[in-house]
Amino acid sequence: MMAMSKKMLDQEPSEIEMLLPFHAAGTLNARDTRRVDEALASDPELARQYAVIREEYAETIHLNESLGAPSARAMHKLFAAIDGEPVRKPSLSTGLSARVAEFFSRLSPRTLAWSASLGAVALLLQAGVIGAVLVKNQTASFQTASLSIKEPSSAPFTRDLGASVPPRALVRFTPEARMSDITALLDNYQASIVDGAKGGMFRLQFGSRALGKDEVASLLSKLQGEKIVNLAVPTP
Amino acid sequence: MQVLYGRHHVRVFRFGLRLVRDEQVAEDLISEVFLDVWRQAGKFEGRSAVTTWLLAITRFKALSALRRRKDVGLDDETANAIEDTSDDPEVVAQKKDTSVALRKCLTSLSPEHREIVDLVYYHEKSVEEVAEIVGIPENTVKTRLFYARKKLAELLKAAGIERGWP
């Protein structure tokens, strides 16, 4: 037994071997994930070890989930202690960062991965809905155009989409995006999350005033160019 | 604070419980952890995830609690001595159940191996985050997890379970 241990411990692991558990848990960056994927595809021995790791991963989760939850005593003790603390008023910015931090930290890598997949499905559905609306509106505009000939005014017929509403977009962040990056991006764009995590997409609102069509297009183009943004599409 | 507690207290409790192995102590720990969070909320700068911050505080509190308890040490020998009071690996092997044996052996790992396995597999922390929580270099995170897994394989082998690795 001791001899076996010694022999095993003497064996130096390769870099890829050491990354396998993190790959199984989905916490590697894109570059390392690709390296491990390639190694797994070409090395059966490594693939065998990966299967063992997946088993360890599942059982570790099972073991931890079986530990149960603390009793209400812990919560009562905590809030009694907090009641005894001097009252503080956190600043608005701290409160906002904390809320954003909480919001993103509660999404585990597994949840984010699922959210990304759901986001793709949601995007397809959204494309379908937009397509249907466009087709419907095309018929309506034909009727309006025929009527406008009789009008003396040559001003183009436009539909009011709510000029006073600031621009909004559905945004999907990359899996590598850290909470601090997202908070910085929100600050830079003076944006706020008005709805979130539906299918991995967050509805952001930019500023507090309405923008022109060109300004919105420019804003979205800039947003789409951000490293941590996978997708940004306009939304009402 | 209630929202923060509601979202994270179970994970904090489980991480603490796996370290201190005493439900009463683990429950006391979470009160201390969240009270610290309440007091230090202004110091949180958002450079890391809230869970990483919480787990780092929990670990520190758990180790302090262990130091206070003279009957529990941090070395492998003491930890293994405590674990041997229930089913031994041979009994587990008789059950012919790899899953049960695996969970038993996960419990039998040393505290430092247990915490790294839990942080990576259960708490889904990256190399960088584990390094921040445990306070060790990133390369040490990777090698420590590798040797924790080697140890796990040894324990399973001793229980008569071969998994094809190493």
Image: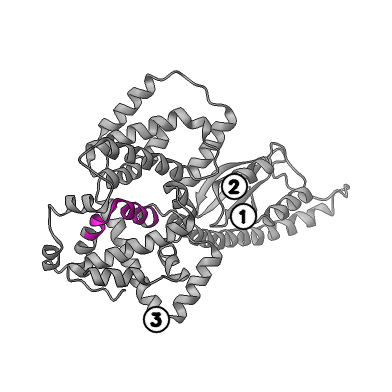
Vertical arrangement, residue A68 with respect to residue A173, above or below: above
Q: Give me the C-alpha separation between circle 2 and circle 1.
A: 8 Å
Q: Is residue B139 magenta?
A: no
Q: Is residue B34 above or below residue A106?
A: above
Mark 3 or 2, which is nearer the eye? 3
Task: From the viewer's perspective, tell me whether residue B127 is left or right of residue A61.
Answer: right
Q: Residue at x 52, y 46 (%)?
A: A196
Closer mark to the observer between disc 1 and disc 3 = 3
Q: Which mark is residue A44?
A: 3
Q: Amino acid at mark 3?
A: Pro
Residue underneath mark 2:
A182
Q: Which residue is mark 1?
A: A228
Residue closer to the observer: B80 or A97: B80
Labelled disc at residue B20: none
Picture colour scheme: one colour
Label 1 and label 3: CA atoms lie apart by 35 Å
Label 3's element? Answer: helix
Could you tell which of marks 1 and 3 lies nearer the N-terminus? 3
Residue drawn at x 38%, y 60% is: B145
